[in-house]
Image (cartoon, rainbow, N blue to C red):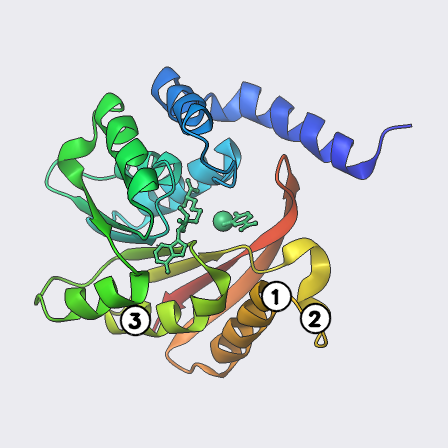
Amino acid sequence: MTSDKELWTAVDHYVTDLIVRPDPALNAALEDSNAAGLPSINVSPAQGKLLHLIARMISAQNILEVGTLGGYSAIWMARALPSNGKLITLEINPKHAETASKNLGRAGVAGLVEIRIGRGLDTMEQLAKENRPPFDLTFIDADKPSNADYFAWALKFSRKGSVIIVDNVIRNGAVIDSNSLDASVQGVRRFNEMLAAEKRVNATEIQTVGIKGYDGLALAVVL
Ligand code: SAH
Ligand code: DHB
Ligand code: MG
């Protein structure tokens, strides 16, 4: 018998092969990330393309990412940027950042991307002092207990119309368990409550299934 997870995976492969069609640099980024021992927790190809399409739909010129890993999602988003665009991606682990740097270089987008190594919250505090243009798109995908704090910074870095996307907000459905002992689940719940109460955004959450199992994305537009 085919399990739900097997079916979601088979359909994700079908959609990816037919519609997403990831290219050699993206595949190589995953291969080298694996070889370097990075965890396989990057967005799926279909999700990476969703990030790419959203960036294009809003003509994003300045993008912020929290959680670089091997640069897989960063490559997808950087490829949506115009030649004068910029993606700043934040990563705490120097080994991840080094792998990402190589992967971004091979993908031909190194000139559009700046990787900043450090705790995301510290780097965001630093970014706030730099008098930068607002970020048109922020993708939050790092340690889940900090989600609410990352979101608060993302709001500060936004303008009217900016889009904020947060990964992993469903956690195999565990998000509805208010008694969960999982710090990531509690972090997501705290973020969700903040999102619900935040009058400066209009938001939804979409459950997703596929090669990464059952999870979801939060999408918000800044009013
Ligand atoms: N966005 C990536 C996946 C990110 S995985 C992709 O889809 O390709 C989460 C990453 O966040 C990991 O590389 C981890 O090292 C990093 N991370 C964890 N805690 C962090 C923190 N406090 N600050 C910055 N990065 C952090
Ligand atoms: C994990 C983190 C992620 O960002 C993700 O997309 C999937 C899993 C994790 O830490 O387990
Ligand atoms: Mg994620």
Q: For numbered disc 1, what is the local secondary structure?
A: helix
- Residue 70's mark? none
Which amino acid type is shown beneath numbered disc 1? Val
Residue 168 placement, left or right of 25: right
Residue that mark 1 sits on: 185
Residue drawn at 25 percent across, 27 percent down = 102
Residue that mark 2 sits on: 180
Do the numbered discs 2 and 1 sit on residues whose CB atoms are within 8 Å? yes
Name the spot of residue 84 as percent of width and height, x first: 10, 41
Which amino acid type is shown beneath numbered disc 3? Trp
Mark closest to the chain's N terminus, 2 or 3: 3
Residue that mark 3 sits on: 153
Residue drawn at 51 percent across, 41 percent down = 41
Residue 132 placement, left or right of 51: left
Mark 2 surroundings: few (<14), some (14-19) or many (≥20) residues within 10 A: few
Residue drawn at 38 percent across, 46 percent down = 54
